Amino acid sequence: MTDTRTSDTSRSPEYRLAQVAVGGLRQELFDDAFAYRPLPRVDTGGGGLRFVPRRIRPYTGYVPHAVVGALALIVLSIGLDRVDGGPASALYVFASPVIVLMTLIRPVLAFWASLASVPFLGVLSGFEDGWPWAANVFAAHVVVLAVTAARTRPRTAGWMWLVTAAYALLAEMLLGVGRSSNTLPLLFTSALALLAVTVVQVRRQARQEVTAERTVTAEERSKRTVLEERTTIARELHDVVAHHMSVVAIQAEAAPYRVENPPPELEQAFRTIRENAVAALTELRRILGVVRAEDYEAPDAPQPTLADLDALVENVRAAGLGVEKTVTGAVRELPQGVELSAYRIVQEALSNVLRHAPGAVAKVEVSHVLGGLGLRIVNGPPRGTVKPSPGAGHGITGMRERVTMLGGEMTAEPTADGGYEVTAFVPVSREEAPE
């Protein structure tokens, strides 16, 4: 029988708990203990600082730095009672304030420095102010614990307090036999300070999380409002345009019967109008249906491709536009997105010619090259008495977006003879081409 247990699963829960605890201690107090982390300025536009006069408000961002500096001065004043003019007393007086100021740039290192300085500064003081914490060391360590906890995470505060308690217990067991200890007052005072700092941190983090959630909720509400507005516009557009297109189709179908012996050309013209109206109505319902209903399912009808360009050209010719189509290169099957976008670009370009250059002659060139597909739609100046229809330029924008989406390039500009030219190139790699 094979034992499938790994070394991690075979160990006891107590061992794994201890392993997690040691890992947390290492992460909080050993990893990047020497990291340079200067205390940043606070936001001068929030909290009570917004009520400060504008002239001095820029300087209020350094209020935390000033508070730490003031606490260092208090620690310094406590140690001044031990000054006797010697270098040892100077070290005793200034070491603790310097450690307090170190919390401004290296908070975790300041904690270890404060803890390591306890026996040395205690020896310099002769332990006259207490064992093992001298008076200024006592105050400095409480300040260092509070400032470091405020600059890190609540879990770090807990580990610092436990390390301090372990150090004090070790000192009591090895060196403190027969002496009165001030460890319990230190642990009690530091616990109160760390508790206050942790409560403030938790409240601040909760406030930040609530603010972030409110921001996300407001953004989602704004997006939902925009989508609802678009849905409303789509419904209104569908109802209005579909009605008029239906009327056009019905009138085009009935028009030949209102004329006695209509010529074949007239019947063909009305038939073309009706077919275009029905096709536009079907396309309109298919596209707007996507935004009109959440459970809309696209129809199974195939999308147009380059193979349908001949029918498109014939349809445009029937509408009165002279079109010449040229295909160069080895015709091959292209990805569906490229085929559809190319068809739509040609369709939109020819529609622009019908609207903006009535009577002009257009040329459509489709080039199958090794690296992709090239398109060129060019038309001459408008001719005849029909006035061009105004446009907002959305057709050109739509064509450009299609080309950009496929990673291609497009130009659309007037020609020297007063016409217009649209050129586009869509890259197609061998991997993208269907087999």
Image (spheres, rainbow, N blue to C red):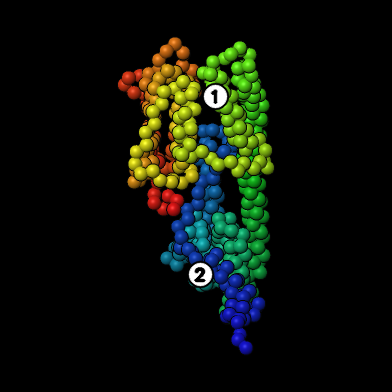
Name the residue nearer the viewer: 23 or 305.
Answer: 305
State the residue position of label 1.
Answer: 272
**Residue farthest front in this picture:** 261
Amino acid carrying label 2: it is Ala
Residue 262 place in picture, x, y as percent:
57, 14
Dot 1: what SS? Answer: helix
**Residue farthest left in this picture:** 416
Q: Which mark is residue 127?
A: none
Name which residue lies at 60% across and 17% down: 256
Amino acid carrying label 1: it is Thr
Name the residue nearer the viewer: 97 or 105.
Answer: 105
State the residue position of label 2.
Answer: 116
Q: What is the crowding at mark 1: few (fewer than 14 residues within 10 Å), some, or many (at least 20)?
A: some
Q: Quadrant of residue 227?
A: top right
Left or right: where does residue 393 sit relative to residue 261? left
Name which residue lies at 39% across and 43% down: 331
Q: Return the disc, 2 or 1, that comes first in the chain's sequence.
A: 2
